C-alpha cells in the first residue's frame, strides 16, 4: 500500500469518511472474494503514523462481527468500510484509488489532510520572527519535507501584515501537491509555533521545477 481513518456492524453509522473509486472498489471486492466468508469481512483503513508530510496507512480485511466499539462502519456498494475512531478526522475527505503510474500495483490514498510536523516537539524559538521561522524550518519543517526530496526557504517577512514569504525547492518545486503541503503543513506549523505570523505566502516559481515529487 502506498501514499502522492465503530460501532458494531449491525448498528452501522451513516456518513462517508473515506471515498473509494469504482476501480479501487472492484479491486478490493476481487481480493475479498478470495477469502473465506467474504460477506463477513469489511475493509479496515487506519492511519498508523506519518512520514514527512504524509500519513502512513494500514489496510486489511477484518471481520465485521469483531469491530471495536467506537469505530465507524459504513457501506459503499457491496463493501463495508471500517475506520478506527482515531483515524476518522485524518482520513475525512480522502479517496482510495488505484495508482496512476503504469505498472504500479496496490492501492493509493489521496488525502488532502496532512500531519502536523510539530506534533510531539518541544520547540524553544527565540529571536526575531525571521530567525524563529528559520529555526523552525531547520528543526522541523525541512526534515519532514526531506522525505520528498524538498525543502522550504524563508525569503522575506512583512512585519506590518505579519506575512512570511517562502519558496519551496527540490521535490516541492513544481509539485502538484505543494499547495496542499503548504496549506496543511507548513502554514499551520508556522502559525502555531509563531503567533506573530498571520499568513505564509508561497512565492515559488513552480513552472521551473525539474523533478517534482507526486503522491
Image: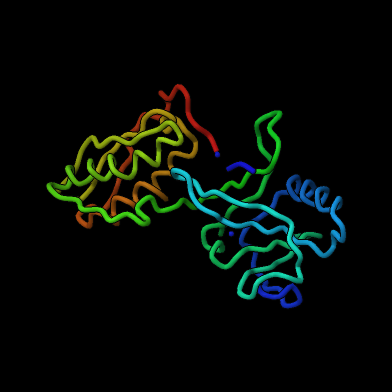
Q: Is residue 83 left or right of residue 26?
A: left
Q: Is residue 47 left or right of residue 129?
A: right
Snapshot quadrant of residue 72: bottom right
Snapshot quadrant of residue 37: bottom right
Task: Relative to 92, say whether 203 is above or below.
Answer: above
Count of numbered marks: 0
Q: Position of residue 152 (x, y in %)?
A: 33, 36
Q: Position of residue 174 (x, y in %)?
A: 44, 30
Task: Relative to 94, say whether 153 is above or below.
Answer: above
Q: Position of residue 105 (x, y in %)?
A: 71, 36
Q: Nearer the viewer, residue 161 or 146?
A: 146
Q: Residue at x 81, y 53 (%)?
A: 32
Task: Relative to 77, say whether 106 is above or below.
Answer: above
Q: Is residue 64 left or right of residue 211?
A: right
Q: Residue at x 23, y 35 (%)?
A: 155
Q: Residue at x 28, y 35 (%)?
A: 153
Q: Nearer the viewer, residue 44 or 78?
A: 44
**Colour approach in the figure:** rainbow
Q: Is residue 21 left or right of residue 190?
A: right
Pick the quarter of the image with the N terminus. top right
Give the farthest residue toward the left.
127
Task: Relative to 39, say whether 194 is above or below.
Answer: above
Snapshot quadrant of residue 157: top left
Pick the quarter of the image with the C terminus. top right
Q: Residue at x 40, y 28 (%)?
A: 170
Q: Nearer the viewer, residue 51 or 180?
A: 51
Amino acid at each position: 500500500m502506498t501514499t502522492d481513518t465503530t460501532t458494531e456492524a449491525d448498528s452501522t453509522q451513516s456518513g462517508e469518511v473515506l471515498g473509494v473509486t469504482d476501480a479501487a472498489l472492484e479491486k478490493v471486492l476481487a481480493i475479498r472474494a478470495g477469502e473465506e466468508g467474504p460477506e463477513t469481512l469489511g475493509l479496515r483503513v487506519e492511519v498508523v503514523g506519518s512520514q514527512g508530510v504524509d500519513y502512513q496507512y494500514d489496510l486489511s480485511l477484518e471481520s465485521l462481527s469483531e469491530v471495536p466499539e467506537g469505530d465507524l462502519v459504513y457501506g459503499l456498494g457491496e463493501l463495508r468500510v471500517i475506520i478506527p475512531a482515531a483515524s476518522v478526522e485524518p482520513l475525512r475527505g480522502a479517496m482510495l484509488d488505484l495508482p496512476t503510474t503504469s505498472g504500479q500495483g496496490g492501492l493509493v490514498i489521496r488525502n488532502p489532510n496532512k500531519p502536523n510536523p510539530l506534533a510531539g516537539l518541544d520547540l524553544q524559538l527565540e529571536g526575531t520572527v525571521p530567525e524563529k521561522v528559520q529555526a523552525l524550518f531547520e528543526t522541523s519543517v525541512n526534515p519532514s519535507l526531506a522525505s520528498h526530496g524538498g525543502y522550504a526557504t524563508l525569503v522575506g517577512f512583512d512585519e506590518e501584515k505579519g506575512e512570511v514569504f517562502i519558496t519551496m525547492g527540490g521535490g516541492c518545486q513544481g509539485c502538484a501537491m505543494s499547495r496542499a503541503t503548504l496549506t496543511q503543513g507548513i502554514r499551520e506549523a508556522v502559525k502555531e509555533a509563531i503567533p506573530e505570523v498571520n499568513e505564509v505566502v508561497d512565492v515559488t516559481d513552480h513552472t521551473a521545477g525539474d523533478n517534482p515529487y507526486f503522491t
